[in-house]
Amino acid sequence: MGITPAELSKIHPTLFHMAEPDTWESIEKNGLLSTSALLDRFCVKAPERKKIELSNRRSSVEIAHPQYGKVTIRDQIPMTDKALERCLEDMTVPEWYRTLNGRVFFWTTSERLTRLFDARAYRGKRQTIITIDTKSFLEERRKSRIVSHKLRKYDL
């Protein structure tokens, strides 16, 4: 049996997300979107979409749209195809990346967020840290498929 929203928000009252600093305006306007949702919204087509969505990004990728502006999609430096091949079952590496890019990720502790923030690839670079009240976020999420929850931003 899984954890209930009430239990999760009691254990982890705050959720954290680390984003590229130039994406805040888009997040505030359009919500926190997965890579796949961004590619949809920004009308990114193959072959560029395939490269971004189905394989490892060794560097961040900037995409632009006349209506939505510019956003940066973060790299995936910590992952390697070789390591994924060793551990994946019933899924190919491109299928893994498609699954991964269809989600938005949150850290449940400031310690885990700090580990990412201090990782060699991001150390010394500006980041936008978003904090979310878990209880109100989950309540709003339960009411609607579209989350317009108030986010708080910190530039670090």
Image (cartoon, rainbow, N blue to C red):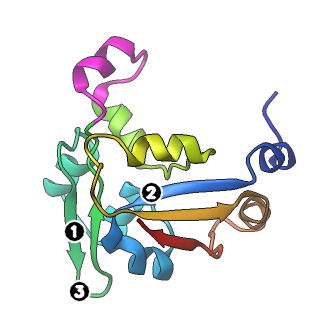
Mark 2: which amino acid? Met
Which is nearer the N-term, disc 1 or disc 2? Answer: 2
Q: CA distance from mark 1 to mark 2?
A: 18 Å
- Give the numbered dot on residue 108: none
Quadrant of the rendering where the N terminus is positioned: top right
Q: Secondary structure at mark 3?
A: loop
Q: Is residue 150 above or below residue 156?
A: below
Mark 1 and mark 2 residues within 8 Å of each other at the beta carbon: no
Name the residue that disc number 3 marks: 66
| Residue at x 24%, y 25% (from the top left corner) | 81
Q: Is residue 20 above or below residue 10?
A: below
Residue 91 image position (x, y, % from top left): 39, 23
Name the residue that disc number 1 marks: 63
Q: Secondary structure at mark 2?
A: strand
Q: Is residue 141 above or below residue 13?
A: below
Q: Secondary structure at mark 1?
A: strand
Seen from the viewer's position, the closer of residues 75 and 143 is 75
Name the residue that disc number 2 marks: 18
- Left or right of 73 on screen, residue 129: right
- Mark 1 Cα-neighbour bin, 10 Å: few <14, some 14–19, many ≥20: some
Which is nearer the N-term, disc 3 or disc 2? Answer: 2
Q: What is the span of residues highlighted in magenta in the rendered image? A: 78-93
| Residue at x 28%, y 33% (from the top left corner) | 94
Magenta highlight on residue 84: yes
Residue 41 image position (x, y, % from top left): 36, 71
